[in-house]
Amino acid sequence: MRRRRVPDHSWALEPDPLLALARRELAFYARTCDRARRLHYVTELGALLTTSMTVVAAGLHAPAWLTALIAGGAVFFTGVRQLFSPGSRWVLAARARETLRRALDRYLLLPEPERDVAARQSLQTLIEEVGANELREWSEAQGRRPEPPVPATGA
């Protein structure tokens, strides 16, 4: 049975819920950025290594099964790169994280008495804009991805 994830609204119970929300969003984008960066490096290095090894294996007249296995690894890493686009995901998350970090810093640099309605509204608007922009850019990237071919039915 699949468990449904309950949204975390614990930030709303904090003394400054907007500040807590901004920190939660910043942490999310930091984790996403790090995860995408690691996946990007793994897929790029994996593709580079396996394509290079395929050429070497073929040049050394390695058994066909070994050369095919290594070439299959190259196809796998290329597929992961195409499917998950970790490089572009890394850039999107890093941009969102940096925008949020700067806005949060500006908010925190204000003395508490100056964190008025206008300052809070500015931070809240930016948090919402970052989320909307990130979602829009991600969905546009998904729209540029070619549709997989539909298998032909034999008649």
Image: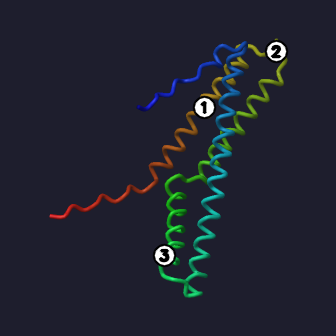
Residue that numbered label 3 is attached to: 68
**Camera-nearest residue between 80 and 65:** 65
Provide the residue designation for mark 1: 129
Q: Is residue 132 left or right of residue 27?
A: left
Query: Is 27 rendered above or below residue 73?
Result: above
Q: Name the image quarter holding residue 44.
A: bottom right
Look at 48% across and 81% down and name the residue there. 64
Three-letter code for the amino acid on which mark 2 is drawn: Glu
Disc 1 residue type (three-letter) = Glu
> Does 113 sit left or right of 33 as displayed?
right
Residue located at (53% from left, 44% from top): 138
Describe the element under mark 1 as helix, strand or loop: helix
Residue beneath the point at 72% across and 15% down: 16
Tag 2: Cα neighbours inside 10 Å, few (<14), some, or many (≥20)?
few
Q: Can you say whether 145 is above or below 119 in the image?
A: below
Up-down: is 73 above or below 33? below
Label 3: which secondary element: helix
Amino acid on which disc 3 is placed = Ala
Cα–Cα gap, marks 2 and 1: 24 Å
- What is the number of the mark on residue 112? 2
